[in-house]
Amino acid sequence: MSGCKYWFILLLIICADIHGAQAQQTLTLKEAIRTAVNNYGTIRAKSSYAEAAKNSVVQAKRDYLPNLNISAQQDYGTINGQNGPLYGFGGLAAASSGAPLPDQNWNAAFGGLYLTNINWDFFAFGRAKEKIKTAQAVAARDTKDWQQEIFQQEVKVAAAYLNLVAAQKLTLSYQKNLNRADTFRKVVVTRVKNGLSAGVDSAQANAEVSGARIALTRAVDFEQQQSNLLAQLMGIPAQPFSLDTFFVSRVPALFSDTIPLDNHPVLQWYKSRIAVSDEQAKYARTLMYPAFSLVGVLQARGSGFEPSYGPGNLNAFSHDYWNGIKPTRTNYLIGVGVTWNLAQPLRISRQVKSQQQISKGLQAEYELADQQLKAQLQLSDTKITNALSNYNEVPFQVKAASDAFLQKSVLYRNGLTNLVDVTQALYTLIRAETDRDIAYSNVWQALLLKASATGDFSLFEKEL
């Protein structure tokens, strides 16, 4: 029985280790970007807006089709007619027709009306065409907005990923610093106990360990913040990440060639906004002109009242349902008409000028964005140069600081220097190690800044 318990416990431990390994599966930068593009709420929302705009284009094209209405009604009522003027205000008057009678009577019969109507604005000086173009411009704008949102999200996720990699490396460096400080504290305590160093050295060493522990806590806190930010940008719950840090240890291919910004997703979006405003102005201008319409009507009507029904023959009607609703008279009408609101040009002219001013404002926004991107592109080249300089220099800094700390430690153990010199060497070493961690990340951050400025994320992605 005890043997079975042993194997059962061992199996549980193995399963727990497998689960932990799966939970800490390495997250690559490409996987993080792909997850963000699929999950992030703003991207999914703008994707829906783009699809909605495409459907609006189809709707605009179908709006040009003629209106075809069919109608049928079957009624029962009287037909007392009366001579006199009448305006059917709001459609609230009855449409009963019959000869005027000298007295009111309540003779009633069934009646039916069957109607087919077609109405088509076949020519309106390009109004339908401009409406379609406006809808297409809106669809293009929303699609560009969705694409630039994806691009910006890719840049944000990549930056957050690099920041988290740097934060994790800083945490490791501060952990090493704490271990060094604690190890050296033990050396100091031993020397103090043996009377080889002053008692104040022990207190100072304890203070250095506490300071190293606080610095480590701050580093862990910063790492947790960056991890939380990355989870938010990926659209997933906050969780610890095991990241791929191999690519950060090498230098990517850095391009210094001048790249045109015309195809930048952000600039393309600004251009599409201007195009929408211009098309709206063109469409509004067509509203100044008349519309030519083609109309056609086919009407059939039935009545339970005979044609001879009148003051001298009030019995010429039938209560029979079929005789009342059966069509006995048919009429048709075909015509061409024109409608022009002469006051419309006065109103629309102001609307057109207003839309033109909006286009100028959008053009100014485009020029500002273009100027900012050019400045960012120039800055990225400077940052690449500086990042490479630091990347090449930092190994010498780390080695020199490490050698200095080792020498000071050996001298202190042999009573040839004081604790202040050792502490200063320790500070220099941790600063060199943190500079190294940041320098490695800054090279990739500089490349990411250049990709962001050029609008070509593949410059960064293909180096992963």
Image (cartoon, rainbow, N blue to C red):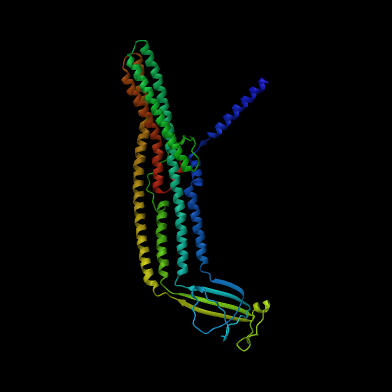
Q: Position of residue 173 (x, y in %)?
A: 41, 28
Q: Quadrant of residue 116?
A: bottom right
Q: Nearer the viewer, residue 31 or 6?
A: 6
Q: Position of residue 223 (x, y in %)?
A: 43, 34
When the figure is inspected, residue 292 is found, relative to residue 175, above or below; the finding is below
When the figure is inspected, residue 282 is found, relative to residue 182, above or below; the finding is below
Q: Position of residue 327 (x, y in %)?
A: 64, 79
State the residue at coordinates (40%, 42%).
Answer: 447
Q: Nearer the viewer, residue 61 or 399?
A: 61
Q: Nearer the viewer, residue 440 or 75?
A: 75
Q: Quadrant of residue 459?
A: top left
| Relative to 70, 86 lies left or right | left
| Relative to 67, 377 lies left or right | left
Q: State the quadrant of the N terminus.
A: top right
When the figure is inspected, residue 421 is found, relative to residue 163, above or below; the finding is above
State the residue at coordinates (52%, 79%).
Answer: 335
- On the question of residue 464 being in view, the answer is no
The residue positioned farthest toward the top in the image shown = 194
- The number of numbered discs placed on residues in the rendered structure image is 0
State the residue at coordinates (49%, 73%).
Answer: 90
The residue positioned farthest toward the bottom in the image shown = 312
Q: Position of residue 328 (x, y in %)?
A: 64, 81
Q: Nearer the viewer, residue 378 or 181?
A: 181
Q: Quadrant of residue 19?
A: top right
- On the question of residue 147 being in view, the answer is yes
